[in-house]
Image: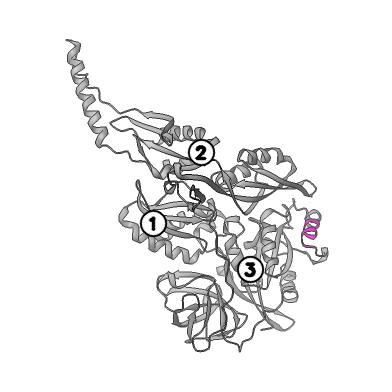
């Protein structure tokens, strides 16, 4: 056990974690030359296309130093704020972390929040300055920032480059010397923490675990504590580039277990595995329950695909534990699910994965956040969906969730960023210089305002320099109203939203204008209206496509033309009563992109 080291790689998005992980794998000869490709651990097509890590990836490698062979369990983690739950789970399975900072960009918001997460778990932190081969690197300035943040000595910071392989040997040496070996007793009752799982259509569910205490052997009868189910360990093994079966694994190791589990409800990330005959006294503290930030309805395009969609979401949830869902129904879209996501990128990725991995084509409604509604009888109810709002006559007040946001940026962009945050009803808490020309701004913002396009606009204002990180900060009373969109007098519940009173009229007008462009013309007039309660605040009309019925009627009395036009008018009226308006999927999406 003294020769095992478990560590993860944490950093802000785009600081070169996956590339550095490639160099470590190459140096320890874990990956053969023929398998070597850029970002070898990012095995999802989506990750390669977008150049981001979505899942954390565990892999084991062997390293020889001074005649001793060491086993390294490395977990490469995502850098985007929407996938921070992946990072927190990886940190729980490690004793140390490589904190990577880009030498051209310095410390950014996600670097700080990931670092605090690692410190809370008492991990040993090795600071690494990456991208040292680039001409724009500022090693001395970034070194000062790291020393200020960590309180370490300058010589403890390793200078490296994922591209050229500089400093890789130093990193491996530091892992052996600085990161402690896992503590645990191989002879104690078995205790394993499940930190991830994946669905395989041939083998069932594969759970990844870290053994805290005890030893597990192939064929053992094991029990999952949270669900109370018992299984045979048909296969256990370690995670290389492929899974490598083993006869036994003992304390300190990271591995996988296949026990023929078919239903996804039976495996929970954060659960403990133990032996049935000699169970452990207590379960390991799992992870804190994840709190979704953004809610949206996900509906199948064909109603009969509802059960297939349920199966697809359950399988996806195995691999992405931060996704939550519950069934709901909508008048316009039929049966579907109310899903909770950690942010807009997370929502986009889930939608894309449903399409690619499970061939499920879905409609997603306008995303919103959860509100607390207090009635006049002082009862509290949580509302995730505007259609769930009780009658406004009975409502005393509505409270909306706020977040505490940290934005790190260059001083050049401060004015525009402050304007953006104040437009979004933000409240400046403090601003301070981190170094030279970099500042940290702390804002309290309503979560509902940043759900749509805040992050995109922040990036474009700051030319991609500002970094953004946030955490929930309670609920506050707010003047919110429900904005309905009506088509020919019928409300479309998938387009309704809860919105602050001051923004309602402008948003209503813009939504009507946008829908007028996107809804195709019919044989009858379509009235698009935005309403608050019974009051209509905006209207657009899509004119009917009409046939020139008087073309064949030339010369003669006007009454002959009038007769034909009246007949056409009656037909249009009849059509309007039975006709229904199809709202295309791109209309739902375009409403989100209003800026």
Most foreground residue, 216 or 482: 482
Q: Residue furthest front?
A: 377
| Residue 269 sits above or below residue 534 on the image | below
Q: Residues within 10 Å of mark 1 (few under 14, many from 20)?
A: many
The quadrant holding residue 415 is top right
Looking at the rendered image, the disc whose residue lies closer to the viewer, 1 or 3, is: 3
Residue 340 position within the rendered picture, expressed as x and y whole percent measured from the top left = 49, 56
Residue 360 is labelled as 1
| Residue 76 sits above or below residue 46 on the image | below
Q: Is residue 190 visible?
A: yes
The residue located at (53%, 88%) in the rendering is: 278
The quadrant holding residue 545 is top left
Check disc 2 and report the residue beneath it: 594
Q: Does the magenta segment cover residue 178?
A: no
Q: Residues within 10 Å of mark 2 (few under 14, many from 20)?
A: few
Residue 161 position within the rendered picture, expressed as x and y whole percent measured from the top left = 71, 61
- First in sequence, mark 1 or 3: give its number: 3
Secondary structure beneath dot 3 equals helix
Residue 287 position within the rendered picture, expressed as x and y whole percent measured from the top left = 58, 68
Check disc 3 and report the residue beneath it: 91
Looking at the rendered image, the disc whose residue lies closer to the viewer, 1 or 2, is: 2
- First in sequence, mark 1 or 2: give its number: 1
Most foreground residue, 236 or 336: 336
Image quarter (top left, top right, bottom left or bottom right) of the N terminus: bottom right
Image quarter (top left, top right, bottom left or bottom right) of the C terminus: top right
The segment highlighted magenta reads 143-152
The residue located at (46%, 75%) in the rendering is: 227
Q: CA distance from mark 1 to mark 2?
A: 27 Å
């Amino acid at each position: 056990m003294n020769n095992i080291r478990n560590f993860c790689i944490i950093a802000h998005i785009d600081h070169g974690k996956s590339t550095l992980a490639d160099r470590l794998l190459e140096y320890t000869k874990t990956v053969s030359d023929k398998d070597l490709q850029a970002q070898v651990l990012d095995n999802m097509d989506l990750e390669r296309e977008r150049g981001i890590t979505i899942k954390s990836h565990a892999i084991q490698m062997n390293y020889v130093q001074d005649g001793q062979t060491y086993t390294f369990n490395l977990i490469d983690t995502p850098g985007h704020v929407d996938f921070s739950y992946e990072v927190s789970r990886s940190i729980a399975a490690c004793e140390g972390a490589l904190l990577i900072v880009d030498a051209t960009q310095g410390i950014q918001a996600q670097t700080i929040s990931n670092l605090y997460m690692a410190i809370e778990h008492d991990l040993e932190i090795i600071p690494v300055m990456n991208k040292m081969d680039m001409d724009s690197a500022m090693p001395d300035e970034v070194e000062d920032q790291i020393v200020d943040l960590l309180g370490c000595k300058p010589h403890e910071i390793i200078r490296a480059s994922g591209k050229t392989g500089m400093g890789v040997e130093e990193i491996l040496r530091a892992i052996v010397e600085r990161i402690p070996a896992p503590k645990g007793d191989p002879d104690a009752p078995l205790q394993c923490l499940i930190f991830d799982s994946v669905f395989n259509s041939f083998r069932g569910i594969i759970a990844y675990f870290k053994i805290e205490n005890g030893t597990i052997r192939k064929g053992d009868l094991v029990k999952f504590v949270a669900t109370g189910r018992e299984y045979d360990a048909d296969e256990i093994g370690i995670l290389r580039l492929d899974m490598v079966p083993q006869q036994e694994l003992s304390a300190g190791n990271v591995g996988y277990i296949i026990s023929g589990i078919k239903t996804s409800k039976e495996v929970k990330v954060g659960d403990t595995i133990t032996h049935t005959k000699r169970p452990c006294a207590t379960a390991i503290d799992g992870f804190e329950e994840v709190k979704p930030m953004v809610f949206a309805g996900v509906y199948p395009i064909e109603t009969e695909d509802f059960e297939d969609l349920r199966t697809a979401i359950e399988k996806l949830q195995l691999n992405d534990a931060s996704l939550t869902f519950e069934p709901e129904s909508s008048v316009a879209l039929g049966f579907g699910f109310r899903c909770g996501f950690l942010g807009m990128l997370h929502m986009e990725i889930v939608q894309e994965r449903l399409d690619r991995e499970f061939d499920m084509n879905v409609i997603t409604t306008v995303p919103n956040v959860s509100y607390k509604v207090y009635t006049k009888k002082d009862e509290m109810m949580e509302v995730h969906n505007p259609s769930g709002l009780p009658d406004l006559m009975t409502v005393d007040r509505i409270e909306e969730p706020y977040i505490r946001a940290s934005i790190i940026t260059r001083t050049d962009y401060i004015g525009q960023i402050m304007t953006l945050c104040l437009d979004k009803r933000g409240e400046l808490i403090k601003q301070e210089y981190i170094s030279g020309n970099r500042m940290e701004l702390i804002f309290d913002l309503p979560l509902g305002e940043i759900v749509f396009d805040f992050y995109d606009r922040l990036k474009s204002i700051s030319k991609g320099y500002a970094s953004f990180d946030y955490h929930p900060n309670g609920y506050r009373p707010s003047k919110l109203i429900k904005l309905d969109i009506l088509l020919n007098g019928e409300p479309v519940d998938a387009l309704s939203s809860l919105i602050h009173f001051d923004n309602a009229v402008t948003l209503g007008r813009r939504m009507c204008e946008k829908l007028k462009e996107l809804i195709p013309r019919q044989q009858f007039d379509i009235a698009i209206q935005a309403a608050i309660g019974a009051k209509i605040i905006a209207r657009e009309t899509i004119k009917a496509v009409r046939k020139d019925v008087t073309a064949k009627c030339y010369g003669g009395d006007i009454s002959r033309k009038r007769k034909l036009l009246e007949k056409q008018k009656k037909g249009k009226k009849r059509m309007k009563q039975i006709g229904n308006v199809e709202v295309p999927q791109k209309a739902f999406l375009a409403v989100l992109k209003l800026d």
